[in-house]
Image (tube, helix red, strand yellow):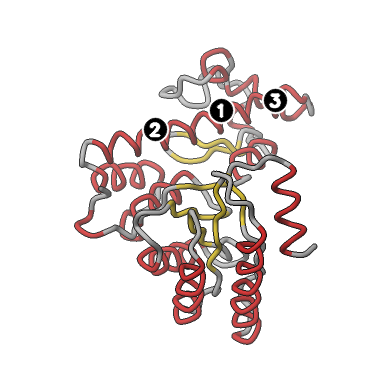
């Protein structure tokens, strides 16, 4: 794979948003590895920029640097200088703690243009998303809702439950009484546990539908809170319900998202 080949594949797929080819090291990594990844990511981004057709589709650059603040700043400056349609924060959720991921994002967001989409790659839980939106992130991607669903881990408005636990064997209640998804409207926790324990593919499908609905509702609720100027209060209440304290959040100026 080369930067040019990556661009050609994304162009052939008809991608509306293409990502520059980057070098994403795991964490922890030694300083030399992180610096090499920044250097390589910048060089590859320049090559991607050069061959990408300027036909109205977007090309995003990716900032690397691991957990090193100086390298993050260096990478962000170099990627910004190339002029992309949007900017992604890469190299988080690659082995480090959730708290460190949030710290890296909080420190990196101010380095990115306010008039371009800021995209956080590979995160996270609903609580992560709520915190990261408060830090100024616009766009996310993550396998977590579907992967967790296949493992029987379901997100609710009050935190996660593991549906295979014996306590749910005869439970007639929905996964989440406040959820309006098809799974919660028609199936009980007890039935979902039965499907999961029996290895029925329907169980994984119903779990997945529920988790995706929970994520969509989280984002919709966050959007309404932003529009109504009450994001800080929404964030704190969400984190309290989900069992994560509000003290870990990283706000944009003034404590509210504009």
Ranked by sequence position, the earlier of labels 2 and 3 is 3
Q: Position of residue 68 (x, y in %)?
A: 50, 79
Q: Label 1 near label 2: C-beta < 8 Å?
A: no
Closer to the camera: disc 2 or disc 1? Answer: 2
Is disc 3 surrounded by few (<14), some (14 to 19) or many (20+) residues within 10 Å?
many
User: Which residue shows up at 38% across the image and 50% down it?
Assistant: 133
Query: Residue at horizontal 58%, vertical 45%?
Result: 55
What is the CA distance from the residue labelled 2 to the residue labelled 3?
26 Å
Front residue of this view, candidates 169 and 77: 77
**Contact between labelled residues 1 and 3, with CB atoms less than 8 Å apart:** no
Q: Which mark is residue 203?
A: 3
Q: Which mark is residue 152?
A: none
x, y percent for residue 29: 63, 78
**What mark, if any, has residue 220 been given in the picture?**
2
State which quarter of the image contains the N terminus. bottom right
Q: Is residue 65 above or below residue 215?
A: below
Q: Label 2, secondary structure: give it.
A: helix
**Which circle, 3 or 1, is nearer the viewer?**
1
Between the C-alphas of marks 2 and 1, the distance is 15 Å
Kindly identify which residue carries mark 1. Answer: 210
**Quarter of image, res 110:** bottom left
Q: Is residue 156 left or right of residue 141?
A: left
Residue drawn at point x = 70 percent, y = 48 percent: 10
Q: Residue furthest bottom?
A: 32
> Judging from the image, what secondary structure is the residue with disc 3 in?
helix
Left or right: 81, with 167 as reference point: left
Q: Earlier in the sequence, mark 3 or mark 1?
A: 3
Label 1 crowd bin: few (<14), some (14–19), many (20+), radius 10 Å? many
Q: Is residue 32 left or right of residue 128?
A: right
């Amino acid at each position: 794979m080369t930067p040019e080949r990556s661009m050609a594949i994304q162009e052939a797929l008809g991608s509306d948003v293409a990502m520059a080819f980057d070098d994403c090291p795991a964490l922890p990594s030694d300083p030399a590895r992180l610096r090499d990844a920044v250097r390589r990511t910048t060089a590859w981004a320049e090559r991607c920029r050069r061959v990408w057709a300027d036909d109205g589709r977007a090309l995003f650059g990716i900032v690397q640097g691991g957990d090193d603040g100086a390298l993050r700043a260096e990478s962000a400056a170099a990627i910004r200088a190339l002029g992309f349609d949007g900017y992604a924060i890469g190299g988080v959720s690659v082995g480090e703690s959730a708290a460190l991921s949030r710290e890296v994002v909080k420190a990196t967001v101010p380095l990115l243009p306010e008039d371009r989409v800021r995209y956080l790659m590979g995160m996270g839980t609903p609580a992560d998303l709520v915190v990261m939106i408060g830090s100024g992130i616009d766009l996310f991607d993550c396998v977590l809702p579907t992967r967790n669903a296949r493992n029987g881990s379901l997100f609710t408005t009050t935190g996660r439950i593991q549906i295979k636990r014996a306590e749910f064997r005869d439970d007639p209640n929905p996964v989440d009484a406040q959820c309006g998804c098809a799974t919660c409207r028609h199936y009980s926790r007890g039935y979902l546990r039965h499907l999961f324990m029996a290895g029925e593919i329907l169980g994984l499908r119903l779990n997945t539908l529920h988790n995706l609905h929970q994520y969509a509702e989280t984002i919709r609720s966050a959007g309404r809170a932003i529009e109504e100027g009450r994001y800080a209060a929404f964030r704190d209440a969400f984190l309290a319900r989900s069992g994560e304290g509000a003290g870990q959040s990283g706000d944009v100026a003034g404590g509210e998202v504009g």
